[in-house]
Image (cartoon, helix red, strand yellow):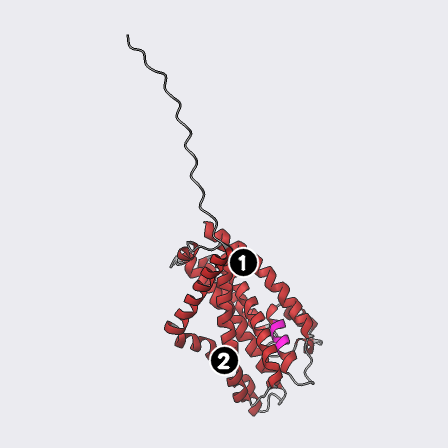
Amino acid sequence: MSVTAPATPSAPTPAAAAPPPVRWSDQLATFRAVLWRDLFVTSRGELVGFIAQVLIQPLFMLLVFGKVLGDLGFANDNFVHVLLPGVIALNAFLIGLENTALPMVMDFSFTREIEDRLLAPMAIPLVAIEKIVFGAIRGLIAGVLLIPIGMLMLGVSWPLSTVLPVLGVLVLGALVGAAMGLTFGTLVPPHLIQIMFTVILTPLMFTGATQFPLRGLDSLRWFQVVCSLNPLTYVSEATRALVAPPGVESVPLWLDLLILAGTLVFFTVVGIRGFMRRAVD
């Protein structure tokens, strides 16, 4: 009769070591690389289409409202000083919004290109922030391109001392537009995106104080209240406060910047949450 030796208990297998966390310096390097790639693609393959997108609509607005109506006597000479900063603010804001919202819908629903970004060695919120920054850069370019063209078209000149402050306002306005674009692009279902642009963008355009100063609506209090709820209003008013002649009353610059900063934080937080929810799905 054979005796079987008792089995020796095997040592527990150690759990697989978790991969080391990616350092912040490496994540920021990846962030810069992804942002540079997006900018490179725009400069090489989409430049002509991008310039057409950002210039055709605002140039026609300046032509009709600023030049044609002025030459016909339906607008006084001071109107161009109200119109030009408003249209420039509109361009930076809307291009930032559109160039963030539409790619979000395409990436999550059709092309699925966002999956490559999510596999990159950086945190998911950084992927969302890169989308905001890229959309804001496009919005800033759109606003800056319109400045010299609009000045030549309308015969307007601004002091050189206002150049840097105006650029700062346009940066903030483009960031707010891009953050709103991230929010809309991640929260609105893909089949409703066209309706969203009709229902949301049209009121944004015409209640953003781009063609009139907000404080000039005192006799239309209900419309003044509606316009005061639009973040674009404060981009227009901040730009106008820097360059408009003394006769044009604007909302104080400090108040414009405070409201825009709060709006940027709010929509960035909401947009990142929506982005993370869509990324996990």
Question: Quick one: label 1 or label 2, which is nearer the N terminus?
Answer: 2
Residue for point 56% across, 90% down: 155
Secondary structure, mark 2, is: helix
Q: Relative to the observer, which residue lies in front, 275 or 191?
A: 275
Q: Quadrant of residue 253?
A: bottom right
Q: Seen in the image, is 115 located left or right of residue 168?
A: left
Of all residues, the one furthest to the left in this rendering is 1
Q: Which residues are magenta?
A: 233-239
In the image, residue 189 above or below residue 220: above
> How far across and down, in percent of the image, does residue 134 sit?
48, 67
Left or right of residue 196: residue 37: left
Q: Residues within 10 Å of mark 1 (few under 14, many from 20)?
A: many
Q: Which residue is mark 1?
A: 271
- Count residues near mark 2 (Cα–Cα under 10 Å), then give few for <14, some for 14-19, many for 20+: some
Q: Foreground: 54 or 10?
A: 10
Asked if residue 63 lies in the magenta stretch, the reply is no
Quarter holding residue 12: top left
Res 229 seen here: no
Secondary-structure class at tag 1: helix
Residue 222 percent across, percent down from the top left? 68, 70
User: How many labels were placed on the picture?
Assistant: 2
Q: Nearer the viewer, residue 121 or 106?
A: 121
Determine the main secondary structure of the stretch shown in magenta: helix
Quadrant where the N terminus lies? top left
Q: Which mark is residue 145?
A: 2
Q: Residue 20's spot in the image, x, y percent?
A: 46, 47
Amino acid on which the number 2 mark rests in the picture: Leu
**Kind of residue sitting beneath label 1:** Gly
Q: Is residue 13 above or below residue 279?
A: above
* Residue 237 lies in the magenta-colored region: yes
**Residue 267: x and y, percent?**
58, 61
